Image: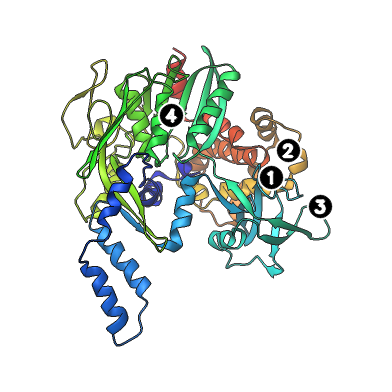
C-alpha cells in the first residue's frame, strides 16, 4: 500500500506517476474533432527533415525512433501534463482508464524469486478452472518461470496477451505432491475503479465508505453500484475517499458529482484558446442529493478528483477532510496518430464553481521545478500543519453560501488532518519500505490457509490473529533479513501499527479488498475524523 510507506519516499515514488496517470480528460463534445485540422499544415519542417534523413542521410537510421524522440522533446517544452505516447506504450497507458485488458486474471507477487498467486480475479479466465490463491507458478508454456531475473514486467509480458490465445502454467500447491498444469484462454480482465466499499457503524447510524482509485470509463457505473449496495445495507451518510486518486476522465467526475447536487448547480467549466467554453451543471436527477457527505483528499488527489471535491466544496454540499490536493487544473485532449501513437495535449483550463482554477504554477518547459513542488511541500511541513500552507493565488473566491476559498494550488480541505507520525521509527521505515510486512503476511497466510479459511470477515479473523501471537516469528523474520534495530523503544513505538498492517495484509490474502480496507480505515486518522464529523 502506497499510503503506508515512509512519506519522504512516497513523494518521490508517486509524483512521477501523476505526470502520466492524471494527464487525460475524456470529452464528449465537438471540441475533440477541432484539433485534428491542425495536424497537417501545408509546410511542415519537421516532417520534411525526417524525410531528408530517411532518403538522403549517408548511414541507415531508425526513423520511427527519431520521430518519437523529436515529438517527445517538442511536447516536453510545454506544460508538465502534456505528453507524447509512443505506439508501443499507448495500449498499456490507455488500459488504466478503459476498464479492462486481456490476460489470465490473477493478482501476483514475486516472493523469493517465485511468482506467487495472491488472488484469482472474479470474472477472469482463471476463475473456476482450478487455479487458487497461494499457487506458485514455476513453468509457463514449458519454460522455467522462476529465478533471480524474475520481474513484474516479465510476468505481465508473459501472461498478458491477445484475447482468445492460450497460455499453459504449471503450479506448485501447498500440500500437493506433484505440479498442477492449467491451460488458460486469455480474456478480458476488468480493471476496477473502486478499491473498496463497506459499512462503518457509528453512534448516528451506518456510514457508507467508498474508495475510488481513478476516473475511468467504468467508474460512474461502479460508483453508483457501490452507493446503492451501501444504501441497501442501511447507509444514511457517505464517505467518498479520493486519496491517492490521480484523476482520469473529467466526464466521470461530472456524472458522479451530479448524483449529489441540486438542479442547476454548477459542477465545472473549461475553456481554452481553441476550446470554446463548456459548462457542466447538475440536472437534478441525482439519487443522493439529501444524504450527508464527506470527501477525503490528500496531496496526491489530482485532476478529476479535484473537480469532484471542488464541486462539492464550492456548492457547500459536502465537507472536505484531509490535506491540500495536488493542484492540477489543466484539461488534456488525446489525439491519435496513424501509427497508433498519440499526444495528450493541454487544450484548456478547468474552473470549479466558485470560479477558481486550482492549477498550481508552472513554467513552460521547466518540468524539473514543477516536480519539486510536492517535495517542497513536505520539507516546509505542509503535510503536517495547515499553518505551513501558502497559496500562489491570494484572490478570494466564494462558495454558494459565501465561505471564502482560494485557488492556485489545489483544493484546501475544510478540515485539515496532518500525516500521522506517532508510529514512525527507523524500524518501521525499514520493514515497510523493504516490504517485509507484506512478505511475512504472505508467508504466514500460505502456511495457515486451512485455519484462516474458517473466518469470513475481518473482525473475526483479526480477533484470531491477535490471539495467534505471531510477533516473535516476525521479529525472527526481520533478523533473517538483516533489519537493524538500534533500540527496543523504536520497536515498541511501531509495534501496534505493524501488527495492524500485517493483519490487514493477511485479511486481504484470505478475503478481499473490502475487508482489508475496513480494517485499515478503522485506525486511519482522516477516516476517524470523517466518522466523528458525520456522527455529530
Q: Is residue 53 left or right of residue 491?
A: left
For the C terminus, the quadrant is: top left
CA neighbours of label 1 inside 10 A, class few (<14), some (14 to 19), many (20+): many
| Contact? badges 1 and 3 (CB < 8 Å) | no
Residue 336 location in percent, x, y?
A: 37, 55
Q: How far separated are the C-alphas under marks 4 and 3? A: 47 Å
Q: How far separated are the C-alphas under marks 3 and 2? A: 16 Å
Q: Can you tell which quarter of the image residue 253 is in?
A: top left
Secondary element at image label 1: helix
Residue 91 location in percent, x, y?
A: 47, 56
Q: Can residue 486 be seen in this view?
A: no
Q: Earlier in the sequence, mark 1 or mark 3?
A: 3
CA neighbours of label 4 inside 10 A, class few (<14), some (14 to 19), many (20+): some
Task: List the residue tagged with mark 3.
Answer: 175
Outermost right residue: 177
Residue toward you, 363 or 229: 229
Q: In this view, does 513 lie to the left or right of 422?
A: right
Task: Say which mark, if any, is on residue 256.
Answer: 4
Secondary element at image label 2: helix
Q: Earlier in the sequence, mark 4 or mark 3?
A: 3
Residue toward you, 240 or 492: 240
Amino acid at each position: 500500500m502506497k499510503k503506508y510507506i515512509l512519506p519522504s519516499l512516497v513523494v518521490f515514488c508517486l509524483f512521477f506517476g501523476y505526470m502520466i496517470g492524471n494527464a487525460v480528460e475524456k470529452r464528449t463534445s465537438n471540441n475533440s474533432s477541432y484539433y485534428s485540422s491542425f495536424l497537417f499544415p501545408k509546410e511542415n519542417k519537421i516532417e520534411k527533415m525526417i524525410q531528408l534523413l530517411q532518403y538522403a542521410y549517408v548511414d541507415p537510421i531508425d526513423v520511427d525512433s527519431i520521430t518519437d524522440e523529436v515529438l517527445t522533446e517538442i511536447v516536453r517544452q510545454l506544460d508538465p501534463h502534456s505528453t507524447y505516447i509512443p505506439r508501443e506504450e499507448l495500449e498499456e497507458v490507455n488500459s488504466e482508464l478503459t476498464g479492462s485488458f486481456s490476460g489470465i486474471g490473477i493478482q501476483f507477487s514475486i516472493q523469493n524469486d517465485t511468482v506467487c498467486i495472491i488472488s484469482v480475479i472474479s470474472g477472469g479466465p482463471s476463475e473456476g478452472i482450478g487455479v487458487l490463491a497461494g499457487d506458485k507458478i514455476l513453468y509457463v508454456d514449458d519454460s522455467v518461470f522462476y529465478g533471480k531475473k524474475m520481474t513484474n514486467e516479465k510476468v505481465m509480458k508473459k501472461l498478458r496477451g491477445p484475447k482468445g490465445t492460450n497460455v499453459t502454467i504449471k503450479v506448485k500447491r501447498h500440500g500437493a505432491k506433484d505440479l498442477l498444469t492449467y491451460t488458460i484462454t486469455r480474456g478480458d480482465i476488468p480493471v476496477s475503479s473502486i478499491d473498496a466499499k463497506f459499512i462503518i457503524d457509528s453512534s448516528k447510524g451506518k456510514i457508507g465508505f467508498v474508495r475510488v482509485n481513478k476516473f475511468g470509463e467504468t467508474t460512474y457505473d461502479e460508483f453508483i453500484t457501490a452507493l446503492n449496495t451501501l444504501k441497501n445495507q442501511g447507509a444514511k451518510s457517505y464517505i467518498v475517499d479520493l486519496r491517492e486518486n490521480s484523476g482520469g476522465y473529467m466526464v466521470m467526475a461530472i456524472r458522479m458529482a451530479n448524483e449529489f447536487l441540486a438542479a442547476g448547480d454548477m459542477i465545472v467549466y473549461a475553456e481554452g484558446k481553441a476550446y470554446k467554453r463548456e459548462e457542466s451543471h447538475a440536472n437534478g436527477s441525482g439519487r443522493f442529493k439529501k444524504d450527508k457527505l464527506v470527501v477525503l483528499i490528500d496531496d496526491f488527489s489530482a485532476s478529476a478528483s479535484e473537480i469532484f471535491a471542488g464541486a462539492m466544496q464550492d456548492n457547500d454540499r459536502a465537507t472536505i477532510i484531509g490535506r491540500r490536493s495536488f493542484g492540477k487544473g489543466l484539461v488534456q485532449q488525446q489525439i491519435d496518430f496513424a501509427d497508433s501513437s498519440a499526444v495528450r495535449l493541454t487544450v484548456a483550463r478547468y474552473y470549479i464553481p466558485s470560479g477558481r482554477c486550482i492549477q498550481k504554477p508552472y513554467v513552460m518547459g521547466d518540468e524539473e521545478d514543477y516536480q519539486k513542488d510536492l517535495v517542497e511541500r513536505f520539507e516546509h511541513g505542509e503535510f503536517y500543519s495547515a499553518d505551513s500552507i501558502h497559496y500562489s493565488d491570494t484572490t478570494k473566491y466564494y462558495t454558494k453560501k459565501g465561505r471564502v476559498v482560494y485557488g492556485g494550488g489545489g483544493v484546501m480541505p475544510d478540515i485539515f488532518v496532518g500525516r500521522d507520525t506517532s508510529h514512525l521509527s527507523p524500524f518501521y521505515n525499514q520493514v515497510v519500505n523493504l516490504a517485509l510486512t507484506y512478505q511475512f503476511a504472505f508467508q504466514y497466510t500460505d502456511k495457515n490457509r486451512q485455519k484462516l479459511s474458517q473466518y469470513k470477515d475481518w473482525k473475526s479473523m483479526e480477533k484470531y490473529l491477535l490471539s495467534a501471537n505471531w510477533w516473535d516469528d516476525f521479529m525472527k523474520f526481520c533478523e533473517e533479513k538483516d533489519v537493524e534495530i538500534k533500540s527496543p523503544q523504536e520497536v515498541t513505538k511501531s509495534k501496534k501499527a505493524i501488527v495492524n498492517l500485517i493483519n490487514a495484509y493477511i485479511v486481504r490474502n484470505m478475503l478481499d479488498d473490502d475487508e482489508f480496507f475496513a480494517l485499515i480505515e478503522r485506525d486511519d486518522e482522516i477516516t476517524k475524523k470523517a466518522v466523528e464529523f458525520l456522527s455529530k
